[in-house]
Image (cartoon, rainbow, N blue to C red):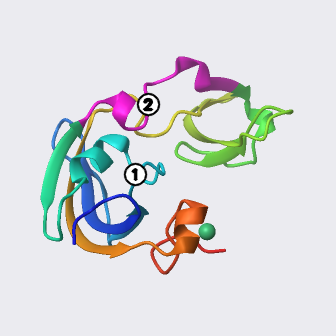
Amino acid sequence: MRIEKNTVVSLNYRMLNREGQIVEEAETPISYLHGGYDGIFPAVEEALHEKEVGHSLSILMEPEDAFGGYDAELMRIEPKSAFPEGVTVGMQFEGGEEESDDMMIYTVTDVTEDIVVVDGNHPYAGMALQFECTVVDIRSATTEEMMHGHVHGPDGHHH
Ligand SMILES: [Zn+2]
């Protein structure tokens, strides 16, 4: 069976930064619905098209192909009084504009006596990443999965 539109593809993968350090590694295979459903990075999806189980690939994704460029406007300086006591670097908070549904995750990047610096960029924003993966399973998607545009089941979406 080959990877084509409306197949569910399972992958083992890892991502490395430019220095060759692993920034993310799947402990169990991930599954996505192939065929332009935005289930995985488009560059990876394109490279996997028509491949079979056992196929491995390694592609370099520029930031715009991965988690986007770094947006300096997403870095904010807030008064420390707005945060819970004991706030430290690395903590994450949800935030967003009042009238928008887009909740964002802000990560604390600096704490001084009076202020807290938070960054709403994805931790990998601005990074070129090497995506390495091996196809471990391919199956036909169910009608429901096609209609929903995502994978159901143990590795996928739960309702
Ligand atoms: Zn669904």
Q: Would you say residue 132 sits in the magenta stretch?
A: no
Horizontal side of residue 27 vs 102, given as left or right: left
Along the viewing direction, whichever of 2 and 126 lies nearer the viewer: 2
Horizontal side of residue 153 vs 46, given as left or right: right
Whether the residue under disc 1 has CB within 8 Å of ligand 1: no
Q: Quadrant of residue 159 in the image?
A: bottom right
The tag earlier along the polypeptide, 2 or 1, is 1
Instruction: Describe the element under mark 1 as helix, strand or loop.
Output: loop
User: In 3D space, how far apart are the residues under numbered discs 2 and 1 (Cα atoms)?
Assistant: 14 Å
Task: Sort mark 2 into few (<14), some (14-19) or many (20+) by Cα contacts within 10 Å.
Answer: some
Type of amino acid at the residue the image marks with label 1: Ile
The residue where tag 2 is placed is 68
Task: Sort mark 1 into few (<14), some (14-19) or many (20+) by Cα contacts within 10 Å.
Answer: some
**Residue under the image location 21 percent in, 58 percent down:** 133
Q: Quadrant of residue 149 in the image?
A: bottom right
**Residue under the image location 49 percent in, 71 percent down:** 156
| Residue range highlighted in magenta | 61-77
Q: Which mark is residue 40?
A: 1
Find residue 103 and report its horizontal and vertical position in percent: 71, 43
Q: Reply above or below: 49 against 121.
A: below
Horizontal side of residue 119 vs 32, given as left or right: right
Q: Residue 85 carries which label?
A: none
Residue that lies at the very extreme toward the top in this rendered image: 73
Instruction: Describe the element under mark 2 as helix, strand or loop.
Output: loop
Q: Would you say residue 63 sits in the magenta stretch?
A: yes
Find residue 111 and report its horizontal and vertical position in percent: 60, 33
